[in-house]
Amino acid sequence: MENKIFSIIDVETTGGGLSGNRLTEICIAKMKNGKIFDKYTTLVNPEKFIPAYITALTGISNDTVANAPFFYEVAEKIQEFTQDTIFVAHNVHFDYNVIRNEFLQLGLEFNRKKLCTVRLSRKLIPNLKSYSLGKICDAINIPIENRHRAEGDTDATVILFQRLLSLDPEFEVFEKFLNPKSKEASLPPHLNSKQVLDLPDSAGIYLFKNKDHKIIYVGKAKNIKKRVLQHIYSKKTNEYLLCQETFYIEHETTGNELTALLLESDLIKKHYPKFNKAQKRPQTSYHIIHYKNRRNIIQLAITKAKATEDSLSTFYNRSLATEKLEYICEAFNLCPRYCTLQSNVEVCTHYYKVNNCEGICNSTEAVDDYNKKALEAIDFLENDRQSYIIYGIGRKQEERSVILVKEGRYKGFGFVDTAEIFSDIEQIETYIERKHHTYHTNQIIRGYLKKNPLENIVCYGAETIPAFSEIN
């Protein structure tokens, strides 16, 4: 690292995520050949309110910065002071992005090579319990004074950086981290680069886990590695916070996007990850049910519930349930009143769009005759719940994925050999890993069927399931 100049930097801010985080203090120490030869430190007026919790942590209050220069007044100094240097910080992405965003607000670019002392420490001083600045300084006996102030933290980072240089006398690790083709400089501070480099370019799901191996995010992708890198390089606050908490990334290939979507949905429901927003809220379903009223008339109705054993049909939208019930009412000459399509009336009205009631509501039709039609409608609804299998590309060339929907409910998925020929579709059930039918799995499968109405789908009732060679 001879003749290279490093700017070792720490900033204090107002907090509030990357987009709203404003600078309150900065310290820059310039180093060459392992020695500090210049230093610059200043408070900065952030032009916004400093929250009480930030003041409690740093000691910097609104009064402290009231007469401090604005960033535009110190921008040129910072630009010149760091020109042709390597930007070094403990958790470099945070400090670098704060400064870069300040310059962007002035319409200026700020681009520097970066080194992260967290990532360098994890490589050169392995197996520490924590790599926060305070904990690492305690672990290797680095004095740290005036904690959570820019100059105090910069001084501690300088000593840490000098220790790291001494642990890499041939500069092999430093050169690797500075290599633009290497991912080391751009990855989150706690993440081993091998975990990212080993990710596949195929479809599946991926899991972001924190230091306790708890899942904090579940995602799906057609290309797992590409999607994970999009998270890492995103400038969005939520993505940045996700990556800051990520210590481990795991994955599972599924061969195709549909199976990945279903597995993602299952894992979100199972683990309720901190950074997943979608699919967390339980969705109410609407069910067509039947019962006998006090006149012994079979009545059809729509009920709103999370689940019911008596359901003839399940919908995740009341209008769809109503549309289906209207169709049944008209097709089987049932009464809108006894299908709960009309309420607060003794006799159904012909002004209603279903108007072929044969008189059960005014007692001109016998109850037994009406119930016979109602039973036929119930039988139709029970048999109308489709059962089918959706095939897809497998995880390897000699297998295919198989998704089972039985009587209108998603049952799960599995993988089978391409050479397998099934004479009885129920044989496939032994390959299925059971999953829960939910609003989201219903929407995923409906969306697929809408786009691919006849592709790779085999319905129950077929005499023989085609060999995979016969399927597109």
Image (cartoon, helix red, strand yellow):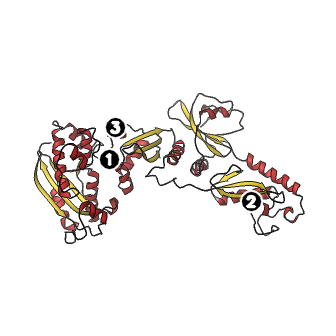
- The tag earlier along the polypeptide, 2 or 1, is 1
Q: Quadrant of the C terminus?
A: top right
Assess whether mark 1 and mark 2 are in contact (beta carbons under 8 angstroms): no
Question: How far across and how far down the image is residue 294, in percent?
Answer: 82, 60
Residue 326's label in the rendered image is 2
Mark 2: few/some/many CA within 10 Å (<14, 14-19, 20+): some
Marks 2, 1: nearer the viewer: 1
Residue at position x 71%, y 36% from top?
462
Instruction: Tell me the distance, in whole angstroms, between the alpha carbons under discs 1 and 3.
Output: 13 Å
Q: Determine which quarter of the picture holds residue 78.
A: bottom left
Q: Name the amino acid type tagged 1.
A: Pro
Residue 188's label in the rendered image is 1
Instruction: Tell me the distance, in whole angstroms, between the alpha carbons under discs 2 and 1.
Output: 56 Å
Residue 292 is left or right of residue 386, and the answer is right
- Specify whether residue 190 is in view: yes
- The tag earlier along the polypeptide, 1 or 3, is 1
Instruction: Tell me the distance, in whole angstroms, between the alpha carbons under discs 3 and 2.
Output: 58 Å
Question: How far across and how far down the image is residue 27, in percent?
Answer: 18, 58
- The tag earlier along the polypeptide, 3 or 2, is 3
Q: Name the amino acid type tagged 2.
A: Glu
Q: Nearer the viewer, residue 331 or 31?
A: 31
Question: How far across and how far down the image is residue 164, in percent?
Answer: 19, 42
- Specify whether residue 84 is in view: no
Q: Nearer the viewer, residue 278 or 354?
A: 278
Mark 3: few/some/many CA within 10 Å (<14, 14-19, 20+): few
Q: Is residue 195 above or below residue 368?
A: above
Residue at position x 27%, y 50% from top?
91
Q: Which residue is mark 3?
A: 194
Question: How far across and how far down the image is residue 349, in percent?
Answer: 80, 69
Q: Name the amino acid type tagged 3.
A: Lys
